[in-house]
Amino acid sequence: MGMFFSQARGERRPEAPGPYWQQRGWQMSAVFLGVVVVLSGIVALTSDGDAAGGRGDPGGTRTVAGPSESPLPGAGRPEGCRTDDSAGDTLPKAVPDDVEWRALNVVRLPVSASAGPTRTDGPLWWCFAHTPAGAALAAHIIPAQMTGPDWRTVIERQLVAGRGRDMFKFQRSLIGDSAADAYESSEYGSYSGFSVLSYSEEKASVELVMKNGQSYGRSTITLLWHGGDWKIVPRGNGSLYTPVEQVQSLEGRLLWGRPE
């Protein structure tokens, strides 16, 4: 991971034109966030039908508790999911004061009793508060689950259906079930903070800030409130987030502090 942030601040090299899977920023974001899909360049050589069909993905999803795959009426939540949504759509001015850090595959992630995920007793970490802070926690948690053996269940339950999800599923199927084995844990950076760029009851845009060594990077994830929980909206090319860009200043971001 360190090689991706090796340039000094203020010396950012313009990204050369070319297919997205060859761009340094796209590869950087894929490695850091744990969604190890750098092999996705192969997708360019396949047809749309191959992508949707998930060739090389013989496994299926598990029947588990979690977000509904279909919209729920009104403000319904899946069975067993309860959160404190009293903050409404007020953007947070600080990180939740009840944050704890827990290991998930190769990364350590912030979890909050108030913002979520409140359910971590199965293959999914889910049940996030219907608030900006809840969306921010979902943006951290959901991509990191893709490195484990239950990635198919995560895709079906925590990504919004569409071409982007089909493309991501195909890309992910090109790697073994335990994608965390593809990289040493020392290659990963750490989450430094976030910013909720936009928010409504139906949709949120969250910027994640990552640190590696003395350098920082930023990437943005879009989420939709669907099936009683926050879900990620994959981009058309199958990526879950925008290419990572270097950050010169942390001003305006909410910082997590040092993981426990």
Image: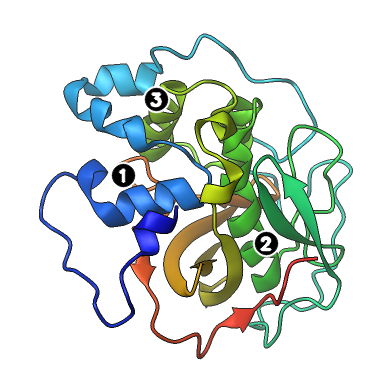
CA distance separating discs 1 and 3: 13 Å
Q: Position of residue 63 (x, y in %)?
A: 74, 21
The crowding category of the residue bearing disc 1, from other C-alpha atoms within 10 Å (few below 14, some 14 to 19, many at least 20), is some
Residue at the spot of label 3:
170
Report the side of 229 relative to 143 (left or right). Answer: right
Q: Position of residue 51 (x, y in %)?
A: 32, 23
Q: Do the residues labelled 2 and 3 touch (CB within 8 Å)?
A: no
Nearer to us: label 2 or label 1: 2
In primary-sequence order, the first of circles 2 and 1 is 2
When asked about the image quadrant of residue 130, the answer is: bottom right
Residue found 30% across the figure and 57% down from its top: 25
Residue at the spot of label 2:
137
Q: Position of residue 41 (x, y in %)?
A: 25, 32
Q: Which amino acid does label 2 sit on?
A: Leu
Q: Which amino acid does label 3 sit on?
A: Phe
- The secondary structure type at the circle numbered 3 is helix
When asked about the image quadrant of residue 248, the answer is: bottom left
Q: In this view, does 133 lie above or below 150?
A: below
CA distance separating discs 2 and 1: 23 Å
Q: Which mark is residue 236?
A: 1
Report the side of 177 relative to 74 (left or right). Answer: left
